[in-house]
Amino acid sequence: MCDYSLESIQSRPAKVGDRLTTRLFRTQTRGFAAPENQHVAVCLLPGTELSFPNEVRRIRLWPWNAGTIKHKTAIFREINQGIPRAHHDALEFPDGQIVLLTLLHEGQQATVLQLPATLERSKAPQPHKAKA
């Protein structure tokens, strides 16, 4: 999904293989931009798997926070759902660390590896019953 602060930005859903870039949009929120147009936000579904070519860089809010996350893969999550006007878009890293997407440095590349299974796609086709 896209954070509430990106609602006024043109957007599209993510596709497997998309090469996205973190970008600071005109709403002063960071998100993923489409490769074909940096002004289009790409909205991810919770559970979308991403790969980064380098360790992920984040904004350091406190001196004791690490500025680099020592992982190159993450899963997109939505957090703070009970708070309507808070940022919800986040990445969960293999060590369990969850970082808001808006706290990532601008200009980082990510590739969409896999979209989450949906109920429709996960249902196995039902065989037709033979009539007696």
Image (cartoon, rainbow, N blue to C red):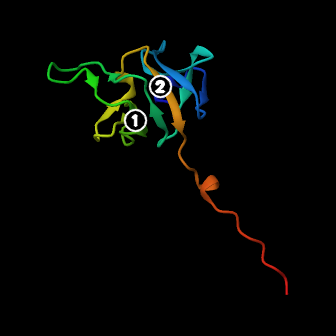
Instruction: Name the residue rendered at 21%, 23% in the picture.
Output: 66
Place of residue 108 in the rendered image (x, y in percent of width and height, measured from the top left): 43, 18
Q: Are marks 1 and 2 in contact (CB under 8 Å)?
A: yes
Residue designated by label 2: 110
Place of residue 21 in the rendered image (x, y in percent of width and height, measured from the top left): 49, 19
Instruction: Name the residue rendered at 49%, 39% in the picture.
Output: 48
Residue designated by label 1: 74
Tell me where residue 74 sits by quadrant. top left
Place of residue 13 in the rendered image (x, y in percent of width and height, measured from the top left): 60, 32
Instruction: Name the residue rendered at 36%, 16% in the picture.
Output: 105
Helix, strand or loop at disc 2?
strand
Front residue of 123 and 25? 123
Which is nearer the N-term, disc 1 or disc 2?
A: 1
User: With respect to residue 130, does 94 lie above or below?
Assistant: above
| Label 2: how many Cα within 10 Å (few below 14, some 14–19, many 20+) | many
Place of residue 80 in the rendered image (x, y in percent of width and height, measured from the top left): 35, 39
**75 sits to left or right of 13:** left
Front residue of 45 and 53? 53
